[in-house]
Image (spheres, rainbow, N blue to C red):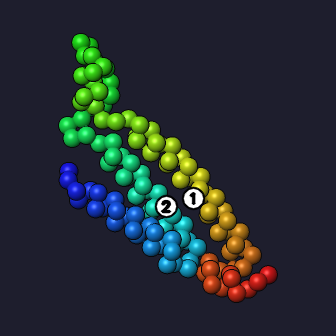
Amino acid sequence: MGIAVYVLAFGLLLIGVYALVAKKNIVRIIIGIAILGYAVNLLLVLVGYRHGGTPPILADGQTSADLAARSVDPLPQAMVLTSIVIGLSVTALAVALAIRLYDKYGTFDMNDIRNLRG
């Protein structure tokens, strides 16, 4: 695993930012937010990865110094789990707002919603 995975994560990050900035459809903006969250989660997991690393579980006859030298960092994994829950909540809120906007204005297009004024 080399730099290609970091390039993939950065590519996902750029796709998410593009969908967030350039698209005018609310559904596509929500999908862009989700892709952006997945890219950040992937980057966090990659930061904590160690080649040949083991899970941070202490076995018989093993000291904590040996474990720390060989194990992957569990903190980014815990942060990703928290981020997944927060991302799901944000996505649910955004979908609920999009449904309410569609009920009121009858469209998902942001340009049409801005022009209606009412």
Secondary structure under tag 1 reads: helix
Residue receiving disc 2: 34
Q: Residues within 10 Å of mark 1 (few under 14, many from 20)?
A: some
Label 1 to label 2: alpha-carbon separation: 7 Å
The residue shown at (21%, 41%) is 51
The residue shown at (51%, 63%) is 33
The kind of residue tagged 2 is Ala
Residue sticking out furthest to the right: 118
Q: Position of residue 64 (x, y in %)?
A: 30, 19
Residue 74 vertical placement versus 97 (above, below): above
Q: Position of residue 100 (x, y in %)?
A: 71, 69
Q: Position of residue 85 (x, y in %)?
A: 54, 47
Whether residue 69 sits left or right of residue 40 in the image: it is: left
Secondary structure under tag 2 reads: helix
Residue receiving disc 1: 91
Q: Position of residue 17 (x, y in %)?
A: 46, 69
Q: Residue 73 — which label?
A: none
Residue sticking out furthest to the top: 61
The residue shown at (40%, 40%) is 77
Whether residue 28 sits left or right of residue 109 in the image: it is: left
Q: Residues within 10 Å of mark 2 (few under 14, many from 20)?
A: some
Residue 70 vertical placement versus 100 (above, below): above
Whichever of labels 1 and 2 marks the residue nearer the N terminus, that label is 2
Residue 68 vertical placement versus 101 (above, below): above
Q: Nearer the viewer, residue 65 or 76?
A: 65
Tag 1–tag 2 contact (CB < 8 Å): yes
Q: How many marks?
A: 2
Q: Nearer the viewer, residue 7 or 109?
A: 7
Q: Quadrant of the C terminus?
A: bottom right
The kind of residue tagged 1 is Thr
